[in-house]
Image (cartoon, rainbow, N blue to C red):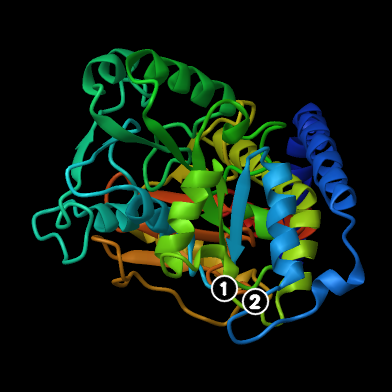
Amino acid sequence: MKVVIAVLKALDFIRQSENEIFHRFQEFDEIAYSNQEKVLKAFQNSKICDYHFNSSSGYGYGDIGRDTLEKVYAEVFDTEDAMVRSQVVSGTHAISACLFGILRPGDEMVSITGSPYDTLGNVIGKGKSPGKGTLIERGVLYKEIPLDANGKPDSDGILTGITSGTKMVLIQRSRGYSLRPALRVEQIKEIIETVRRVNPQAIIMIDNCYGEFTDIVEPTQVGADLMAGSLIKNPGGGLAPAGGYIVGQKDLVEQVAFHLTAPGLGKELGASLQNNRLLYQGLFVAPHVVNQALKSASLMAHCFKKHGYQVFPEWDEPRGDIVQAIKLKSAEEVLEFCQVVQSSSPIDSNVQLEFAGMPGYSDRIVMAAGTFIQGSSIEMSCDAPLREPYCVYIQGGLTYEHCRLVIKNLVDRLILKK
């Protein structure tokens, strides 16, 4: 009987929150409608047919499904060209390919959103013991412009920190393992305009991970030159089994392609194997799946804010990505939170979590990821570094219904029982 009463209390709590934030859900619906129309038109303009789903092997010469998918991506993101490949193993790999494909020894890259997230920091070569093969080890000059007191890009710092010799400006849209706000497209537009005033020739590169389809426009539609992300995040729609994308100016995408395969080969090689249909279908459902994740993040923020937790962003704040951060009280509460998410997952629900070392991260990490695709963070997942402030970072959700159940379990375990 006590269990039934607790479940009812948690459900009542969730329903009350849903009623209070219903207008926010409607806003997310409108964003999804706009993006779904954009994706549908791109499919229709490229006359996608069943034969585009056929596989290729070996070198992958003449893979019409692969080549046409890249045409669709270019239209969706309003760019001259695109490269969409299962052989790209992660978002970090896609961004790394852009940096190594474009930058040469002596070139300067400036990060204007402060320090990049852990794994990209390793690519750059930051830290006391940088690894071999990093950008810095290969002679690329690197500097950062710190964020202002509000955790936002510093316009004055940009004006003084970027020079006529700056080759590339790096903008990280999502928050990473920090509490600074994710960037909305309108903010990215302002940043780009500021950069152009100082150096019109600088290549503006966007790390768009977690940001796709959270707005009705993308950074490449407001002046970004090059952009990359992961297919097991937003644009893969939970169906893409692996991969990443690069979109932007044709000459820049070509340089990145020469790095990913070989000079002179570029985009001509890369077999799609059995993945074409999954990549197409994943992109098609992506606006809807991102909508599910946005609604879930907003509900999560509302529930925990209501009971005294700090949440980033607030449930009614404009969002630049699907990530929801919640500041907890201790490492033990972080582990408990992640364990509830893991135990509420369709896959590996029996796994017991602990903090552990992970490749590319300086702190020990706990990751709740009971996902159909390993590491897929468009599926409901949660992770946190073992460091203060003790925050969890929740992302994704293929269906709102599942996320609602997870939130109910979290409310019951972390709020109503304490």
Q: Which residue is at the front of the view, 197 or 403?
A: 197
- Element type at marker 2? loop
Q: Is residue 118 visible?
A: yes
Question: In x, y percent, where is residue 127?
Answer: 14, 53
- Judged from this view, the residue extending furthest toward the left is 128
| Quadrant that contains the N terminus | bottom right
- Judged from this view, the residue extending furthest toward the bottom is 58
Residue found 50% across the figure and 64% down from its top: 266
- How many badges with numbers are in the image? 2
Q: Which residue is at the front of the view, 220 or 112?
A: 220
- Judged from this view, the residue extending furthest toward the front is 264
Identify the residue position indicated by label 1 in the image: 269
Residue found 68% across the figure and 37% down from its top: 78
Tag shown at residue 61: 2
Q: Crowding at label 1, few (<14), some or many (≥20) Cα neighbours within 10 Å? A: some
- Element type at marker 1? loop
Question: In x, y percent, where is residue 31?
Answer: 77, 34
Indicate left or right for 414 with 156 as reference.
Answer: right
Tag shown at residue 171: none
- For residue 83, above or below residue 274: above
Residue found 73% across the figure and 37% down from its top: 17
Question: In x, y percent, where is residue 52?
Answer: 82, 70
Contact between marks 1 and 2 (CB within 8 A): the answer is yes
Q: Crowding at label 2, few (<14), some or many (≥20) Cα neighbours within 10 Å? A: some
Q: Which residue is at the front of the view, 313 or 115?
A: 115
